[in-house]
Amino acid sequence: MQRRNEKKDDGFTPPQHIAVIMDGNGRWAKHRFMPRVAGHRAGLESAREIVKQCIKHNIKVLSLFAFSSENWRRPAQEVSYLMDLLLTGLEREVEVLHKQQVQVRFIGDRSRFSDILRSKIQDVECLTVNNTGLVLIIAVDYGGQWDICQAAKALARDAVAGLVNPDDITPEHLAQHLSYPDLPHPDLFIRTSGELRISNYMLWQLAYAELYFTSVLWPDFNAAEFEKALAHYAQRERRFGYCSEQLTES
């Protein structure tokens, strides 16, 4: 039975998995009378810093929402730039991540990506697959509804093949077909820029995550802001359906 985060000598037990919506790049640039693409470049620097902080705090999994399935609706020029930024970012960062023993995984529908980008994603995953440090999940062309839908399709195929009886299907059966079924679900969800939504991000997996919203724009989300999010998490009592008295008794 899990309860309030247990204190350790060096502070508290950190979350195993942190999921982040990196919001506010465009507004950050607008406030500085710069093009939106400048905000995305600055946001990449923040992502690099948060990876470092997760390694420092022994976080097992970090998930970054880089591009949602709804982001295709943005201006074509911005979408094209984001795709280029993802490609160049991977080329620039992969060796550093590999040396840090970071295992990089991508979740989402890759069918609309260019052949070059799909190939680079596969190369990065293959290079880092055996790394034993932080697992970095990058969600690109991802949506929580898409994730649940593709899991339901896979489960339906199992039922048609006679591998599972429809009447015996449990939530655990469906979960095994979601993205990253071998990893823990997020304990802490962070969204920057003041928006109070989860925006179709990991709808199933965030069921019991602690939610942390901050008005800080993503390019300004640094190590100090990350510590604030961890401090918020440390104060939460994680009951998972139990009452406080049961946790105390346990």
Image (cartoon, rainbow, N blue to C red):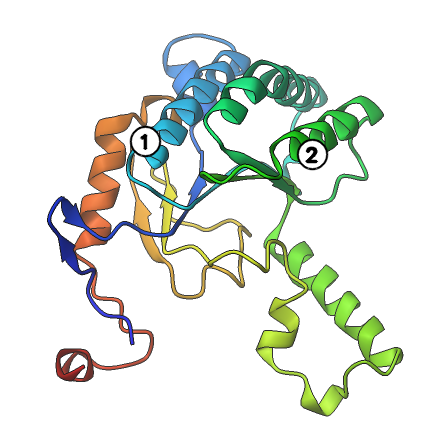
Is 120 situated above or below 168?
A: above
- Judged left or right of residue 78, residue 47 is left
Q: Quadrant of the N terminus?
A: bottom left
Q: Residue at x 27, y 73 (%)?
A: 239
Kindly tell me whether residue 193 is visible in this rendering: no
Question: Given this view, does label 1 or label 2 mark the residue nearer the observer?
Answer: 2
Q: Residue at x 44, y 65 (%)?
A: 207
- Judged left or right of residue 220, residue 34 is right
What residue sits right under mark 2 in the picture? Answer: 126
- Judged left or right of residue 18, residue 98 is right
Residue type for callout 1: Gln
Is 115 situated above or below 227?
A: above
Q: Residue at x 49, y 23 (%)?
A: 99
Residue 154: x %, y % from top left: 78, 66
Q: Quadrant of the C terminus?
A: bottom left
Q: Residues within 10 Å of mark 1 (few under 14, many from 20)?
A: some
Q: Residue at x 53, y 54 (%)?
A: 202
Residue at the farthest right position: 161
**176 and 39: which one is in front?**
176
Q: In which image quadrant can residue 190 be found? A: top left
Residue type for callout 2: Cys
Of the residues under marks 1 and 2, which one precedes in the sequence?
Answer: 1
Q: Residues within 10 Å of mark 2 (few under 14, many from 20)?
A: few
What residue sits right under mark 1 in the picture? Answer: 53
Kindly tell me whether residue 235 is visible in this rendering: yes
Residue 33: x %, y % from top left: 42, 8
Residue 163: x %, y % from top left: 81, 80
Residue 183: x %, y % from top left: 52, 56
Question: Which structural element holds mark 1?
Answer: helix
Count of numbered circles on the image? 2
The image's mark for residue 36 is none
